[in-house]
Image: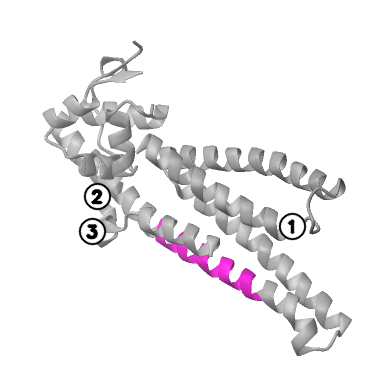
Amino acid sequence: MKNKVRQLRKEKGLTQEQLAEIIGVSRQTINAIEKEKFDPSLPTAFKMARIFGTPIESFFYYD
Amino acid sequence: MVLSATLFVCYKTANFDVIQKPFPILLSAVYSHVPYFVNKTLHFDFFSLLLSSKLYNMKAERKKRILQLALWTWTWVATLALATFGPIFLWKENKTLTITAIIVNLINGGLMVLANVKMFRQYDELEQKIHAEAMGLTLGATVVVGLTYSLLDQTNLIQSDAEISVLIFFVGITYLVTLLINRKKYL
């Protein structure tokens, strides 16, 4: 699974630590998601979508 | 030693930074009455604060659970030592006291397992995946190695008798090693 989490996070001016705090996961989890080593759960993806103000499918896509 | 190392790893990997950040809980209550579409910026701020509030509780809860796990683990080790050495050094083979010590140790062990389960539920999704994979690998390796070890004893290919303590040591080491490998893999 590919994603644009890093790009959207930077557009929002958030650090990994801040995004992790908002979502309720560890900073390492955000890092693993951005590096595409780990696919988040649906609730986490929905939280990200609400923070980024964009639908899930616009930043998570199957390659 | 393995227990100490595991607890140390859990404690070190936990992030308590957020605990120091107080958060007005009232704001969360206010947010629940604000529609999602009102204003994106406003929404983002309220939503962030609401989630931060939850996280504040999560971090505090995690610290509490690590301490609970440490408490139950060490009391279990202590009651195990009491049940093992008590009949020899303290109460001279008194059966009632020995049975009592064993029952206390068993109950303490059960509480330690429950503390472990609560701790596991407190992990975030990636931590749960890392630990679950490590546990799966440890379980599989223990079954295979344990049966092979037992077979070696039965066929007299090893000099000494098969001891359960060897297997428990193997479980601890395997879990720690697989945990470190998984952390390296995902983090």
Q: Residue at x 53, y 65 (%)?
A: B1
Letter of the chain that mark 3 sits on in the rendering: B
Q: Depth-wise, is mark 1 or mark 2 nearer the camera?
A: 1
| Earlier sequence position, callout 1 versus callout 3 | 3
Image x and y of residue B91, in percent: 80, 89
Residue bounds of the magenta highlight: B62-78
Numbered badge on residue B55: none
Q: Amino acid at mark 2?
A: Leu
> Disc 2 on helix, strand or loop?
helix
State the residue position of label 1.
B164
Mark 1 vs mark 3, CA separation in Å: 47 Å
Q: Amino acid at mark 3?
A: Lys
Q: Residue at x 86, y 84 (%)?
A: B93
Image x and y of residue B109, in percent: 67, 63
- Foreground pick, B74 / B5: B5
State the residue position of label 2.
B27
